[in-house]
Amino acid sequence: MSIDGKGYLGRDGNNIESHGWPSDKYWVFNVSANYKMNKNLKLFAKCNNIFNQEYAEQTNAIWGGKPGDWYGMPGRNFILGAELTF
């Protein structure tokens, strides 16, 4: 099992005032787990953005776009799967 996260604690004040980003600070956490059923079968699961944080890593608003014109990242999502080896 693993937990990872990333965060931003502040953006350029001019960008925030022009609504170039959805938030000036945020944290995003992911959790994942693997389980080896036997030597040939492994199951895995992952939940990304577990707190469903709205955030953006890129924006067009501060380079000539309109306020709120950012490229939003995915909300909470899940990945489930199995890996079978022969």
Image (cartoon, helix red, strand yellow):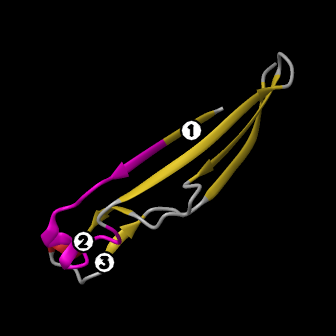
Q: Dot 2 surroundings within 10 Å: few (below 14), some, or many (20 or more)?
A: some
User: Residue 62 vs residue 77: left or right?
Assistant: left
User: What residue appears at the point 27 percent right and 67 percent down from the top-left corner?
Assistant: 59
Res. 32 image quadrant? top right
The answer to whether 85 appears left or right of 47 in the picture is right
How far across and how far down the image is residue 66, in percent?
Answer: 24, 84
Magenta extent: 5-23
Which image quarter holds the N terminus?
A: top right
Q: Residue at x 16, y 63 (%)?
A: 12
Residue 39: x and y, percent?
A: 83, 15
Q: Is residue 13 magenta?
A: yes
Q: Secondary structure at mark 2?
A: loop
- In whole angstroms, how far apart are the C-alphas of marks 1 and 3? 31 Å
Residue 60's tag is: 2
Q: Amino acid at mark 3?
A: Asp
Q: Is residue 60 left or right of residue 54?
A: left
Depth order, front residue of 39/19: 19
Question: Between marks 3 and 2, how big is the CA–CA gap?
Answer: 6 Å
Q: How many marks?
A: 3
Q: CA distance from mark 2 to mark 1?
A: 31 Å
- Contact check, label 3 and label 2, Cβ < 8 Å: yes
The three-letter code of the residue at mark 1 reads: Ile
Q: Which mark is residue 69?
A: 3
Q: Which residue is mark 1?
A: 3
